[in-house]
Image (cartoon, rainbow, N blue to C red):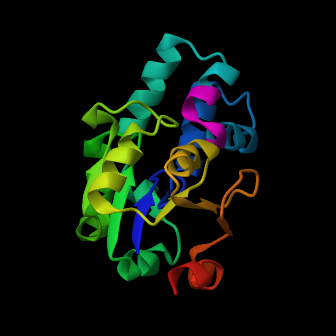
Amino acid sequence: MNILWDFDGTLFDTYPAYSSIFSRVMGGESDEKEIYETLKVSFSHAIHFYNLSENQLREIAALENNLSPNDIQPFEKVEEVLKFADKNVIMTHKDRKGVMSILEHYGWEKYFNEIVTIDDGFPRKPNSAAYQYLHEKHHIDLAIGDRELDLIPAKELGIKTCSFQNQHVVADYYLANYSDFFKTVGEFIK
């Protein structure tokens, strides 16, 4: 099975750190749970929702760049799924340097055949160009993401989809945690 992964909120639990950063930049005036939910739609949605200024966006970027890989934890049992897959690829809006620092910190770079980041020049999700590139090259069987915009491109290309920790999007499969991967996606992988 060849799996296309989103990064933030799918492989790694990054949203608590990002929610904290947003809250700090906004002076603690917004509830971190609300920020978390807004970020789960998309970063651009959160930026517009909170009407952040250019100065605030620069401050958020600087604080994100100062995050340590220790601040970002992988989801429990996701490594078992990575080991199971024949091929794993990533498509993320995160920059390559940030992705690689986290993967290398956990020793996970070995699990990925290819990583497409914002640095590769593809349009942002939900545009399907990066997914199409990865699908043509790696014959993707399943796309896993935590947001609707992660799954829309896969659906356009006829790739099965799996929503992680999000029942609010239409997907072929839903996972609350990776312990349930083989039970939930079992009939597909047989």
Q: Quadrant of residue 27?
A: top right
Horizontal relation, residue 35 to residue 118: left or right: right
Give the residues in magenta: 40-46
Instruction: Decide which of 13, 96 is in the foreground and name it.
Output: 96
Task: Residue 142 in the image: state x and y as whole percent.
Answer: 49, 64
Q: Quadrant of residue 24?
A: top right
Q: Is residue 139 at least partly visible in the picture?
A: yes
Q: Quadrant of residue 114?
A: bottom left
Q: Main secondary structure of the magenta part?
A: helix
The image shows a total of numbered marks equal to 0
Relative to 70, residue 34 above or below: above
Asked if the stretch drawn in magenta spans residue 41, the answer is: yes
Residue displayed at 49% across by 12% down? 54
Task: Residue 171 in the image: state x and y as whole percent.
Answer: 67, 58
Q: Is residue 66 at least partly visible in the picture?
A: no
Task: Residue 76 in the image: state x and y as whole percent.
Answer: 53, 74
Residue displayed at 48% across by 73% down? 78
Quadrant location, the N terminus: bottom left
Residue displayed at 61% across by 83% down? 187
Task: Residue 104 in the image: state x and y as whole percent.
Answer: 25, 62
* Residue at the far top in the pictured view: 54
Residue displayed at 65% across by 16% down? 51
